[in-house]
Image (cartoon, rainbow, N blue to C red):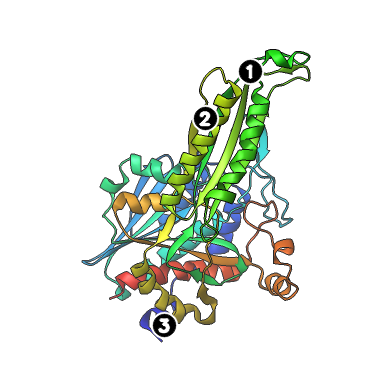
Amino acid sequence: MSEIAQLLRHHQADLSWQREFYEDLHEHPELSGHEQETSQRILRELKRFNCEVISPIGGFGIVAVFRNGEGPTALMRADFDALPIREESGVPFASTRVRPGADGKMVGVMHACGHDMHTTALLGTCAIMDTHREAWQGTFIALFQPSEENAQGANAMVADGLVNKVPRPDVCLGQHIMPGRAGEVQTMPGAQFAACDSIRIKLYGRSAHGSMPHKSIDPTLMASMIVVRLQSIVAREVSPEDFAVISVGSLRSGNTNNIIPDTAELVLNCRFYDNTLKRRIYAAIKRVVFAEAAASGATKDPEMEFFAHGPLIDNDPEVFNTVRPNFDRVFGSASVDAKRTTVSEDFSNLARAFGAPYLFWVVGCTPQQQWDKAVAENRVEQDVPVNHMNNFLPEFAPTVDATTKAGAAAALSYLAS
């Protein structure tokens, strides 16, 4: 057994506070860009450690720098914003919060993606690193990021001078809990999370009374034809060996029964594992949109706006080869190969800003008995809650243990004496 595995199996760090902290965060979630209370809660916990705290960065972002002599620098990131979802988990510490959403309407707020667990785990990793300074040399950076759900937090911290306020890391590390047997640590080199963009397309026609369609240029028909043609891009222009998604999330046009409107709006969501393919698909989408508008006699060219960008998370093979052996030693049979997932994350924006290689991994969080039963009955998709569902809730003990130790094991892979 390696020294890292020995340390993490017999560490002396006090982690008894983690459950109370986690339940408090879970019960009091805050939406992206509004995480003031959460950031203050994190800052209070950081006072227990011997570290330099830099805050705020990029809104409510926080960085804690643990210096321990000469050596490499490793950065570990956690996010802490919540989602506009009304919780239906039924636990005593379930969120009952209601807050104004992006459209001003009141919505429930819930930690439905596990960011409360990510934050709890990173603070636990801080405790281990602070307690066992004899086991490592260099600098450990704990970065707590707001506004991941709207894909703005990482870039906001970078824009606020992050790279000039902290030591440059030699490696960046991150993790995400997802459906899977609680406590199972899943890693892989290469593309792990998909790149994504949303695209808002505005189409221009000419309005007319519903009884006189011949006097209109119908943007609803234009939009409908584009929706159909978009499906052919993946079906006929992408190799079956590649992956691409073009989903039409909304089509808005008109507001009454007897008037043909003058505009229509489409909102797309697109995902890829390859940036070259992404550029080719976006060119095809533009070609289809402009061609259909021209064929319909649109009164002006369509407008296309890209937003909600999620960068490709493409794990560095050398970092994987450095960290994975220690995961195997620490977690044994619970250290397994990951599978690519089509969801997206903004973590890699941080690593790219520093020009540092990175590893981002997944930790299973589904209650172990529930997972084993669903697998045995081949009912995982039907019976296992996934992130962003109103009943998503990790099994606390195995999940917090795995995420806390995984962060420490990954950092110690570079910093161990």
Whether residue 282 is visible to the viewer of this picture, yes or no, is yes
Does residue 227 sit above or below 145 in this rendering? above
Q: How many marks?
A: 3
Residue 317 at x, y = what percent?
A: 37, 68
Marks 3 and 2: CB-CB under 8 Å? no
Question: Which comes sooner in the sequence, label 3 or label 1?
Answer: 3
Residue 200 at x, y = what percent?
A: 54, 33
Q: Name the image quarter holding the C terminus.
A: bottom left
Badge number at residue 262: 1
Q: Residue at x 63, y 18 (%)?
A: 262
Question: Which comes sooner in the sequence, label 3 or label 2?
Answer: 3
Does residue 271 sit above or below 123 in this rendering? above
Three-letter amino acid code at the position of disc 3: Gln
Which of discs 3 and 1 lies nearer the camera? The answer is 1
Helix, strand or loop at label 2? It is helix
Q: Residue at x 44, y 53 (%)?
A: 312
Report the Cα–Cα distance between label 3 and label 1.
69 Å
Three-letter amino acid code at the position of disc 2: Phe
Residue located beneath label 2 in the image: 290
Helix, strand or loop at label 3? It is helix
> Dot 2: few (<14), some (14–19), or many (≥20) neighbours within 10 Å?
some
* Near-viewer residue (276 or 328): 276
Which of discs 2 and 1 lies nearer the camera? The answer is 2
> Dot 1: few (<14), some (14–19), or many (≥20) neighbours within 10 Å?
many
Badge number at residue 360: none
Residue located beneath label 3 in the image: 6
Q: Name the image quarter holding the N terminus.
A: bottom left
* Near-viewer residue (348 or 12): 348
Give the quarter of the image for residue 20: bottom right
Whether residue 83 is visible to the viewer of this picture, yes or no, is no
Q: Residue at x 75, y 19 (%)?
A: 256
* Near-viewer residue (339 or 174): 339
